[in-house]
């Protein structure tokens, strides 16, 4: 199912920050502790980064009361790349920043990934890391398939050009100095941004997209879990 960690390719040292600090309010239970294909969601996510040749260390970010649990799961799963588990902040930006600040000084690249995307593949990780190594900031994304209209007060204002719209995914990978500066700025401005690319764009940095996957879904509601189980069954991992 998961390969052993491979020899790292010729690229900058890459730290992965796994953000696992959400409240799971729309799921109705702790989604990271849910079982998915015979293991918890957080374990599945950690195992993919453990196996990736494009990840050198892992920093997990979670709620303070979950730190012992996450550390134990990683230990029992043989996640040897785990550097530490730290407490997140009150916002996504604060949690990302808490993880980034714990990354090794040797890190030239930092990847930030939603722990609730356990079906990410090694291929997606490698594409994002390689693109960031070349261009400074990269993230996986998929095209919007449906017609999208902008509306206000129930009244349609305009139809947006579908070919130019993308759904962002993670891991989002950045040059280490860039993401550190961007998150410091976002937290200083007390901004509530939904992803880390938005933070680097505050500094007028360009972000480049790589191919994501519809299977790299984020577990938010029970319907997402049903879809994830179907994907694992198709992969032969259920």
Image: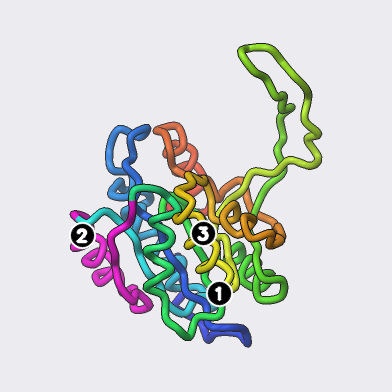
Q: Quadrant of the N terminus?
A: bottom left
Say which quarter of the image contains residue 109: bottom right
Residue carrying label 1: 177
Q: Nearer the viewer, mark 2 or mark 3?
A: 3
Label 2 residue SS:
helix
- 10 Å crowding of disc 2: few (<14), some (14-19), many (20+): few
Q: Nearer the viewer, mark 3 or mark 1?
A: 3
In the image, residue 208 sits, relative to residue 102, either above or below, namely above
Q: Name the spot of residue 63 as percent of width and height, x first.
A: 26, 53
In the image, residue 55 sits, relative to residue 164, either above or below, namely below
Label 1 residue SS:
helix
Q: CA distance from mark 2 to mark 3?
A: 31 Å
Question: At x 65% / y 66%, what residue is drawn?
Answer: 137
Residue carrying label 3: 185
Q: Name the spot of residue 16 as percent of width and height, x first.
A: 46, 69
The foreground one among 9 and 200 is: 200
Q: CA distance from mark 1 to mark 2?
A: 31 Å
77 drawn magenta: yes
- For the record, the magenta segment spans 65-89
């Amino acid at each position: 199912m998961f390969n052993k960690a491979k020899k790292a390719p010729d690229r900058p040292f890459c730290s992965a920050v796994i953000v696992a600090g959400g409240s799971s309010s729309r799921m109705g239970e702790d989604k990271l502790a849910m079982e998915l294909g015979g293991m918890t969601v957080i374990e599945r996510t950690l195992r993919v980064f453990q196996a990736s040749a494009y990840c050198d260390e892992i920093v997990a970010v979670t709620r303070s009361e979950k730190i012992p649990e996450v550390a134990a799961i990683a230990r029992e799963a043989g996640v040897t790349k785990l550097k530490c588990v730290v407490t997140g902040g009150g916002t996504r930006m604060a949690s990302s920043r808490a993880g980034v600040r714990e990354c090794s000084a040797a890190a030239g690249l930092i990847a930030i990934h939603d722990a609730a995307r356990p079906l990410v593949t090694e291929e997606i990780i490698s594409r994002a890391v390689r693109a960031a190594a070349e261009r400074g900031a990269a993230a996986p994304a998929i095209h919007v398939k449906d017609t999208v209209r902008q509306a206000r007060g129930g009244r349609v204002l305009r139809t947006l050009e579908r070919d130019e719209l993308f759904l962002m995914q993670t891991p989002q990978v950045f040059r280490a100095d860039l993401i550190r500066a961007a998150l410091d700025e976002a937290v200083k401005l007390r901004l509530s941004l939904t992803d880390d690319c938005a933070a680097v764009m505050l500094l007028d940095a360009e972000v480049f997209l790589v191919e994501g996957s519809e299977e790299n879904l984020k577990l938010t509601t029970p319907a997402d879990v049903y879809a994830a189980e179907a994907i694992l069954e198709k992969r032969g991992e259920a």
